[in-house]
Image (cartoon, rainbow, N blue to C red):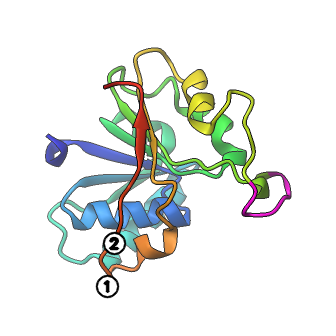
Amino acid sequence: MLASMSIAIVGGTGDEGFGLALRLARAGRDIIIGSRSDEKGRAAAARANDALPGLDTPVRGMANEQAVADSDLVFVTVPFAGQADTYRSIKDSLKPDAVLCDTTTPLATAVGGRPWQVLTPWAGSAAEQAKALLPKGIRLVSGFHTVGAEPLQDLDRPLAGDVLLCGDDA
């Protein structure tokens, strides 16, 4: 089923999202890079297609709202400082049965702190904060917090290790 799904990467113009887009597109998935601006989404998709010549399904780019409306699986790969605004902007465009994977890590850098300090969001965790901002029925998974942008974008090296995922839809 995953092979036939459209996968949106909200924040796909950033390092983590772009790396996920590259890896998933190379694996043969239908990828849509979302951005706050349609133009930036299209530019990132063009970069991905240049990096991955010969794809059966070229990477597409568009504004976040359209990207999620066209997708069954959505990755949100934005910094913690932008998480709430991002969810507010896409929540009405999500398919009612979408699966959403939030990669947000609440690091103190979002508020001028050190990158190794973790914040405690008002809802308890970044995933719980995301869940509070989403419409009922959206299935939320939190993960990819231990997978860095640099290894994702280095297509010459295989990824090694496990990806931890957590959700409440068993």
> What whole-number distance in Å separates the C-alpha atoms at marks 1 and 2?
10 Å
Q: Amino acid under label 2?
A: Leu
Q: Quadrant of residue 165?
A: top left
The span shown in magenta is 111-117
Q: Are marks 1 and 2 in contact (CB under 8 Å)?
A: no
Tell me what residue is drawn at x 44 percent, y 75 percent: 151
Q: Is residue 60 visible?
A: yes
Q: Is residue 112 magenta?
A: yes
Q: Is residue 71 visible?
A: no
Residue assigned mark 1: 156
User: How many numbered discs sit on the rendered protein?
Assistant: 2
Question: Seen in the image, is 103 located left or right of residue 50?
Answer: right
Using the image, determine if residue 9 lies above or below residue 28: above
Please, what is the dominant secondary structure of the magenta stretch?
loop
Q: Secondary structure at mark 1?
A: loop
Q: Quadrant of residue 58?
A: bottom left
Tell me what residue is drawn at x 14 percent, y 64 percent: 56
Residue 21: horizontal and vertical position, in percent? 37, 61
Quarter of the figure that contains the N terminus: top left
Residue assigned mark 2: 159
Q: Amino acid under label 1?
A: Asp
